[in-house]
Image (cartoon, rainbow, N blue to C red):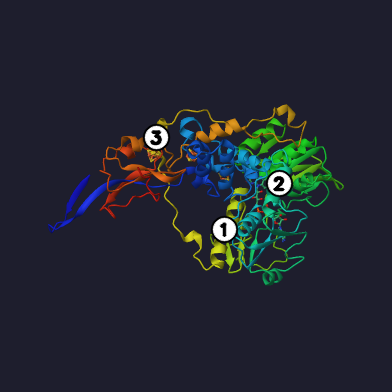
Amino acid sequence: MARTDQHDNGAKEQPFWTRAQQLEKQAPCQVDCPNSGNVRGWLGIIAQRRKHGLSLEQAYDKAWEELVQLNPFPATIGRICPHPCETHCTREGKDGAVSINALERFLGDWAIDRKLSLPLLDGQRYAESIGVIGSGPAGLSFAYQMARRGYSVTLYEKHDQPGGMLRHAIPDYRLPRKLVEAEIQRVLELRISVVNGLELGKDISLEELRKRHSLLFLGMGAQGARRLGIQGESGPGIIPGIVYLRQRKLGMKTGLGSKVVIIGGGNTAIDAARSARREGASVTVLYRRSRQEMPAAAHEVDDAIIEGVQFTFGAVPCKVLRDGNVMTGVEYQRKQAGERDETYQLSADSMIVAISQQPDWHGLNLARDGSKWLLTEEDGKLADDIWAGGDDRGPGIASRSVAHGRLAAEAAHAQLRGEPRPLSRPAPPTVDTGKIKTDYYEGRVRGVYPRRPDEQWLEQPDLEIEQTISSEQACKEADRCLSCGLCFDCYQCVMYCNAGGFSPVDDAAPGRYYALALDACEGCGKCIELCPCGYLEAREGPPQGANSSSASGSRRSG
Ligand SMILES: Cc1cc2nc3c(=O)[nH]c(=O)nc-3n(C[C@H](O)[C@H](O)[C@H](O)COP(=O)(O)OP(=O)(O)OC[C@H]3O[C@@H](n4cnc5c(N)ncnc54)[C@H](O)[C@@H]3O)c2cc1C
Ligand code: SF4
Ligand code: SF4
Ligand code: SF4
C-alpha cells in the first residue's frame, strides 16, 4: 500500500508505505519475573523440538541450559518462587496460566539426575580476582556469573556451609536440602574457592578484603532478627524465627515447648508455625493485620490451617507473661471494629518472634545515609570496587536475589573490561496481549503439581509435600505456551501472503523461521491479522533499504 503525502506548500514528499515487520517483543512472563527469565525461550525449545530434530531428552538438556543462563538454581527456585511470572501469563484468560514454576522445577530436577554441568561463557581467563561476601542466592549468583566469564572467585561465608536462607531457613518439606546442596555444588565446581566460617566485620575487615581482591560483592542478606520490644521479651522461652528454623534445618534440639505462639505474618512466621506443628506443638499465630494483608504466600497459609495452625488476626502482643522466669503466656491487644482495644491473654510456654529481619552492620563501616539497607545504583554498584545485591538492599524473594547477583555481575564485568554497563541499554518492547489471538490455540487443561495426601504431611514431617511433574506432563505443559511476541512457525503468514514475502531461513531456531522481504510486502496487512502471537506488526514510513529484510537470518535458497 503506497501513498504520497503533500505539504501545504505543494511540495511532494517521498512515497509513504505501510509494511509488515517482524518484531520480537518481551512476553508478560518475562516482564513479571524478577530475574527477567527467558521463559518463552526455554519452553519453546521443548515445544518446537521436532522442528529442530531434537529428541525429548536433548530438548530438556538444551532448555535447562537456556534457563541457567540467568538462574543457576532452577530446582530450588522452581520450588519456592511465588512465580509472579504466571500472574499475567496470556494463557490465564483462556484455560489457566502455563505452570512455569512447575516446569522450571522439572528441568532443575532433570539436570540434577543427569548430572549436567553449568555452561561456561567464552573460555576467557581474566587476571582480576573477585571476592564475594555471603553465599546466599545473591552471592552465589554473582559468583557463578563472574566465574563463568573467566574470573577467579573466592566466596567468604560466616557459617560453616554456603547457601544462606536456602540452606539454613526454608524447611525441608518445601525445599529438600539435598537439592539445594546439589545446585550449590554445581556452581562451586566452576573453580570458585569457598572460605567458610569467616565473618566480614569480625574476622576480617572490608579494607583487608579490598586489598586482596580487585572487586567485591556484598550479598550478606538480612540475617538479624528484629525484636518486639515488649515487657518480658528477654528471658527463656523466646526464640527468633530464623534461629529456630536454622536449628531445625541443622537437626539441632530446639527446646520448643508444647504450646507455641508465633508473632508475625510473613514466610518466616508460617514456616516456623508449620515446623512447630511438626514437633508436635499446638500453635497459634498472632498477626497484627488481616489475613489478606499477610505477606506470606496465601497457599502456605491454607496449608498451615490444614495442619492445625490457629490464627488470630488484628492482634498486637504487648507483654510476655511469666511465673518467675518461666513463660506462661502472652498478653495482646485486639481492636474490635469501632471499639477501643481489648486486651486478651493466651497461654503459651514458647514464643517465636518472626516479625522481620534486617542486615547486621556490626563492625562494617559502610555509608548508608541513615538507611538500614545498602543504597546502591540500580545495577548494584556501591563504589568502583564494591557491588551489592539481595536482601541487604531490602527484603525480597530468592529470584530477586539471583537477579541482583546476575545484573551486578554483568555490570561489573562490563566495567572491568571498559565497556558500557548493560542497564543503560533500552529494554525491548512488551507484547500487547490484546493482539494475541488466543482462539487460534487449542484448549488444554493446565498441568499442576501432584501433592502428597494431607494426612501424611505431619506423619512424615520432612518429606516434600509437592511433587515434581512427570516428563509427560512437562511436555504437554510446554506445548501450552502461546509464544507471546515471538514466531513459533505456525506457517500462517507464509500460507496467506499473496506476494510471497516470507521465505524460510537456513539457520532456523526457535523464534527464527522466516525472513520477510520488505520489497515484496504489498502492505495488505493479512499476515498481521493472522499471526497468532503478536510477532508481526505494521510499520509505517518511507521504505529504508528497499531490498533488505527485517529478519537477520539468511534466506534459504530454492
Ligand atoms: C524462613 C524464610 C522463608 C523464605 N521463603 C521464601 C520463599 O518461599 N520463596 C522465596 O523466593 N524467598 C523466600 N525467602 C526469602 C529468601 O530466602 C531471601 O530473599 C534470600 O535468601 C536472600 O538472599 P541473599 O543472598 O540476599 O541473602 P541470604 O540468603 O540471607 O544469604 C546471606 C549469606 O551471607 C552470609 N553473611 C551474612 N553476613 C556475613 C558476614 N558479615 N560475613 C560473611 N558472611 C555473611 C550469611 O551467613 C548467609 O549465608 C524466605 C526467607 C526466609 C527467612
Ligand atoms: S524465577 Fe520465579 S518468576 Fe521467574 S520464571 Fe521462575 S518461577 Fe517465574
Ligand atoms: S503463554 Fe508462554 S510466552 Fe505467553 S506469557 Fe504465558 S508462558 Fe509467557
Ligand atoms: S504467522 Fe506464524 S509463522 Fe508467521 S510470524 Fe506469526 S507465528 Fe511466525
Give how far apart the Cα atoms at labels 3 and 2 are. 41 Å
Contact flag, marks 3 and 2 (Cβ < 8 Å): no
Give how far apart the Cα atoms at labels 3 and 1 are. 40 Å
Q: Residue at x 76, y 35 (%)?
A: 461
Q: Nearer the viewer, mark 1 or mark 2?
A: 1
| Sequence-earlier tag: 1 or 2 | 1
**Residue type at mark 3?**
Lys
| Residue receiving disc 2 | 182
Write down the quadrant of residue 266 in the picture. top right
Res. 346 visible in picture: no
| Residue receiving disc 3 | 437
Q: Nearer the viewer, residue 378 or 106?
A: 106
Write down the quadrant of residue 278 in the picture. top right
Give how far apart the Cα atoms at labels 1 and 2 are. 24 Å
| Residue receiving disc 1 | 122
**Residue type at mark 1?**
Asp
**Residue type at mark 2?**
Ala
Q: Is residue 345 left or right of residue 26?
A: right
Relative vertical location of residue 176 with respect to residue 211 in this rendering, above or below: above
Q: Position of residue 338 (x, y in %)?
A: 59, 39
Asked if the residue at label 1 sits under 8 Å from ligand 2, the reply is no
Q: Tell me the element at label 3.
A: loop
Residue extending furthest front? 558
